[in-house]
Amino acid sequence: MIIQNPFISVIIPAFNAEKYLKDAIESVIKQNYQPLEIILIDDGSTDNTAKVTKSFQNIKYIYQENSGPAIARNNGIKIAKGEFIAFLDADDLWTDNHLELLVSCFKKTHDLEVAIGYVQCLFLKEKNQEKEYFEEFSNSTINVNLGAGLYKKSVFKKLGNFDPNLSPSEDVDWFLRIKEANINQIIVSETMLYYRIHDSNLSKDRKNSYSAFLKSLKMSLDRRKKLRK
């Protein structure tokens, strides 16, 4: 019996992402996987993000006023046609066998709902006018990064989408909700994502990030306490 490949919707939120976006999109196309759709949600970019996206064929380009990645992903989920959802940030890269390995997990385990792999951090080591060079930092590890996983769309119907009030830790909150709901998931001990660390994402508001992270943890604890009563 031949098991058909499931339809996958790949959602890429992008804000002023022209510098790295081409590489990110190409890492999806290199999967050579079908059936697949790529949905790029332009979160109010003022650079050439739209131009880079439209240089590729068959990518659904959606523009929204700047609202943050949580709302961008949620809007992508709304229009996604796939049975499965995958994510990729506009400055990261999938490994070449990303979809092949993750899809194989679902083919082996019928009731599996989430499969997630390891993340390899890449630090910007050198840059000049023509090229930037990234270098691997330490070993790949399990990390809270949506781009390393593959998710049945039905999981979002069970848990709801991402909470924009918890940005930039909406992904932490969502993974905690997966745990609380006993969603059937598997961790694949292979690198699935290259997370590129560079000047732009290093300059994010760390104080705000830490505050949102703590808030998501407290919300999870409150939910668990409520269930015990």
Image: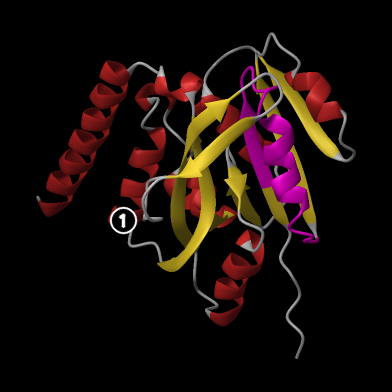
Q: Position of residue 191 (x, y in %)?
A: 50, 60
- Would residue 138 appear left or right of 147 to someone viewing this image? left
Along the line of sight, the residue nearer the viewer: 34 or 74: 34
In the depicted structure, whether residue 74 falls above or below residue 167: below
Protein image colouring: secondary structure
- Quadrant of the image occupied by residue 130: top right
Along the line of sight, the residue nearer the viewer: 122 or 77: 122
**What residue would you read off at disc 1?**
179
Along the line of sight, the residue nearer the viewer: 163 or 103: 103
- Can residue 149 be spotted in the picture? no
- Would residue 207 appear left or right of 6 to someone viewing this image? left
In the depicted structure, whether residue 142 falls above or below residue 63: below
From which residue to which does the magenta span run? Answer: 10-34
Q: State the residue at coordinates (76%, 75%).
A: 4
Q: State the residue at coordinates (64%, 17%).
A: 16
- Would residue 31 appear left or right of 93 to someone viewing this image? right
**For residue 30: magenta?**
yes
Q: State the residue at coordinates (31%, 56%).
A: 179
Indicate the quadrant containing the N terminus: top left, top right, bottom left or bottom right: bottom right
Along the line of sight, the residue nearer the viewer: 128 or 82: 128
Within 10 Å of disc 1 (Cα), the crowding (few <14, some 14-19, many 20+) is: few
- Quadrant of the image occupied by residue 49: top right
Question: Quick one: which residue is furthest to the top in this view?
Answer: 46
Q: Circle 1 — which element?
A: helix
- Would residue 226 appear left or right of 114 to someone viewing this image? left
Question: What amino acid type is highlighted by mark number 1?
Answer: Lys
Question: Quick one: which residue is furthest to the bottom in this view?
Answer: 1
- Can residue 72 be spotted in the picture? yes
Q: Position of residue 189 (x, y in %)?
A: 43, 68
Q: Position of residue 138 (x, y in %)?
A: 36, 50
Q: Position of residue 104 (x, y in %)?
A: 61, 74
Q: State the residue at coordinates (67%, 28%).
A: 131
